[in-house]
Image: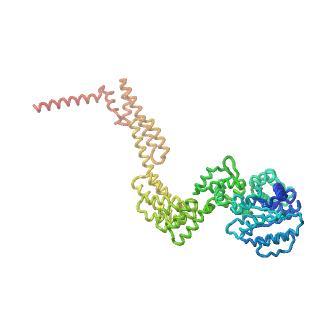
Amino acid sequence: MTIPTNPYIAGKPVGKTPNFIGRDDVLREVERFLRNPHQHALTLYGQRRIGKTSILHYLEDTLSQRGDYVPVFFDLMTRADTSLDGILGDLARTIADRLHLPDPLLDPPLTRSFHTTFLPSVFAQMPESATLVLLLDEFDVLDNTQNPSRGFFNYLRELFRSDFPRLKFVFVLGRNIDDLSNIVYGLFKDVPSRRISFLSEQDTAALVRLSERQGSLDWSDEAAHAVWQLTGGHPFLTQALCGAVWDAAYDQSDTPEPVQATAVEHAITPTLDGYRHALEWIWNGLGPAEKVAAAALAGLGQTIVDEERLVAVLDESGVRIVLRELREAPKKLQEWDILVSANGGYRFRVELLRRWIALNKPLSRTQEELDRIQPLADNLYNAAHILYNDNKLQEAEVELRRVLNLNPNHSGARELLAELLLLNNRWTEAQTELETLFDMAPRRARSRLKQVYLEQIKSATDPEQRQALIDRAWERLADDPDIRSEHHRLYRELGAGYEAQDRLSEALQAYEQVEDIPAQERIRTRIRRQAVQQALTELEQLRRQHDYATAKARLHELAAAYPTDHDWQREQVTLEQDIRLDELYRQALGAVQQEDWNSAKTLLAKVIALDPDYEEAGRYLYLAVYGIDPQSELEQRNRTIARLEADLTRRDKT
């Protein structure tokens, strides 16, 4: 059995006529433009890989069938470094080849012979009613001040003014016209434009089911919807994903079953891997600020993120949103169909693109784009670098601080400023700059910041200052062996000192910093012993106060908290004995009060048997047996002795 051809070729038109999916409206607009004698050009713009080139190829294939037109496709992508004469020569040869004419022989300069000699000869070879339609792809790549082909814009302006009613231009731009330089913007400001955006959900479903019309592969509704959720109607990525699904289906069977949603999910990784160059091309079409914002948002997952959350994420990564470009980045991404607004925030329009960015362009690797956000700041940085290399350090510092005033996120300027400060032995200032740089771009600051920390620690004479430096170093470079060594040495010293002073909680915290398990266990044992001793003292006090209910509850708590640290069973027996003694003694006192001497004698005898010195049990037993309070008898005897001693003293005096 012959396996059919995969109908999903990413980046190519998915149909000739009449079903160019989702793009018939573009064809109608181009035809209206071509019929208008007062318009000489039309621009089509949109994000990269949105299908603009496919549209031009489709126009090249179909316009001649729909009217008296001679369409010629010409790609400028590979000609960004070509001179103006070189571009005109290539364009002339492409037109001649399309019309099956011999190679043109153009006299220099081509800026004159192209429109005075070549174009008239072309029109002479065409039917009188025919219009030459130049389809110029990736036109905006020439918009670079360093490109030798930039004069093409001025040449086109002159060509527009020439009397060539049978010459029309369709320009494709990978940027919004408002983002072009003044020269290019001036060329296009009066030219009508059409934005090429995504397919609707209905058109996306039609593209997904292309294989059904071909008869090679059926799709369940759930699978078609899964494609829509992942691509959001992006034509190129829809074709790429469906192509990966189609290939996987035929790898498993010559007669595959209808596609299910799980097959679409399994095709994500092959799609991202197979079309990484195309995704890089989309990514490279973004500006520096947009790349940073997109990387931050992509890392937050498939969710809606408001501006406050975006600012917080960037701030956590050391990025300060102080530049207009960063503040406006989400809106710019929305204009370019990367994001859509939803519920007061933003989310990615294309989930497939979000996953690729999160995987391949994390914020930690994208932050270096921040150096290029502010062109003036970057130019000043380059000037400062020249001054630095010429050993004009003072002038270089002035320029670098100007850079950071314009763009505080310029990591190159902050790194160079730190180097300059180190050369001047301004260690504390250099440390501050390197710490800021570390929070923004850890890899760029790591080596130098470690050096600064170690030098500062080595020279610190004040113990508190040394500890503060080590703590700061540990906060950022805990995985560095040299910083780890300094940190562990310090906290072992602190732990030993606190332990010697019996400051056990502080000693434990110090030993925890260095994960010294034996020392921690030793300190915890001492802390437990102290706690148990303090608790026993508390229990003894409660017993003396006869607060046995509280003592009993506290004893239960201590036995649960320190089960192996003391003989709590013995304490329980002692407490129960105290409770028994207290109960017997109270009963005995009641019997004495009621002059029930027999009961009193029995109860008091039991108390004395348990504890001979308990309270005043002996006194009351004497009272119960002899009917005399020994305390009163003792007091009477003491009074008598006192009177006798007084009489003797008086007699001795007389």
Q: Quadrant of the N terminus?
A: bottom right
Quarter occupied by residue 324:
bottom right
Q: Please say which color scheme the image uses.
A: rainbow
Task: Answer with left or right where residue 497 lies relative to residue 179.
Answer: left
Task: Answer with left or right where residue 528 lies relative to residue 332.
Answer: left
Q: Nearer the viewer, residue 216 or 47?
A: 47
Q: Nearer the viewer, residue 479 or 436?
A: 436
Q: Nearer the viewer, residue 120 or 250?
A: 120
Q: Quadrant of the C terminus?
A: top left
Say above or below: 95 vs 227.
below
- x, y percentage for residue 488? 48, 61
- x, y percentage for residue 80? 72, 68
User: In this orientation, does residue 588 appear?
Assistant: yes
Say above or below: 453 vs 641.
below
Number of numbered markers? 0
User: In this orientation, does residue 257 appear?
Assistant: no
Quarter occupied by residue 57:
bottom right
- x, y percentage for residue 100? 87, 71
Q: Nearer the viewer, residue 240 or 602?
A: 240
Q: Residue furthest left?
A: 654
Task: Answer with left or right where residue 611 lies relative to residue 204.
Answer: left
